């Protein structure tokens, strides 16, 4: 599991190149409160599973980053299922 002090989105678009999207997919997102070791201040952290997809092929040409984000949101369930299925648990 990944841990971060930044709340993750289910699908995060990193970049688009040559009709392929580099995306991060997150699930099992759990929020936790705990004391920050450096500051002693109570802080929020998130733990989650993550799959990095380096070459999600887009089905058609998208002119803008915003168009790709709309596509990813419209196909979130399919992408999430694919990411979960590709995750190897050791």
Image: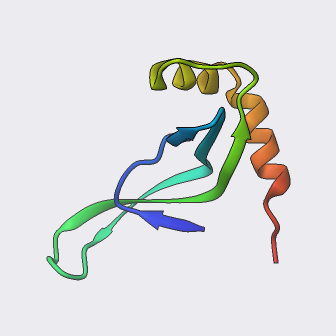
Q: Quadrant of residue 21?
A: top right
Disc tally is 0
Q: Quadrant of residue 43?
A: bottom left
- The image quadrant where one finds the C terminus is bottom right
Residue 29: x %, y % from top left: 56, 51
Residue 38: % across, % down = 19, 81
Q: Dividing the image into 4 quarters, which one contains the N terminus? A: bottom right
Q: Report the residue at 16% width, 69% height from top.
A: 41
Name which residue lies at 46% across and 47% down: 8
Task: Using residue 11 as the reference point, say whether residue 56 is left or right of it.
Answer: right
Q: Residue at x 22, y 66 (%)?
A: 42
- In the image, 90 versus 36, the foreground residue is 90
Residue 57, compared with residue 35, is above or below; it is above
Is 62 or 31 nearer to us in this picture?
Answer: 62
Find residue 28 and report its horizontal and vertical position in percent: 63, 51
In the picture shown, does residue 35 fall above or below 11? below
Q: Quadrant of residue 79?
A: top right
What residue is at 71 percent from the left and 29 percent from the top?
58
How has the structure been colored for display?
A: rainbow
In the image, 48 versus 86, the foreground residue is 86
Rendered position, 30 above or below 67: below
Residue 71 drawn at (x, y percent): 62, 20
Q: Is residue 86 left or right of residue 34?
A: right
């Amino acid at each position: 599991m990944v841990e971060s002090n930044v709340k993750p989105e289910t699908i995060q678009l990193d970049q688009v190149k040559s009709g392929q999207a580099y995306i991060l997919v997150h699930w099992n997102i759990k929020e936790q409160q705990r004391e920050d070791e450096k500051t002693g201040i109570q802080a929020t952290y998130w733990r989650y599973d993550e799959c990095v997809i380096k070459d999600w092929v887009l089905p058609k040409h998208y002119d803008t980053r915003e168009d790709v984000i709309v596509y990813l949101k419209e196909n979130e369930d399919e992408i999430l299922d694919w990411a979960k299925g590709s995750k190897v648990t050791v």
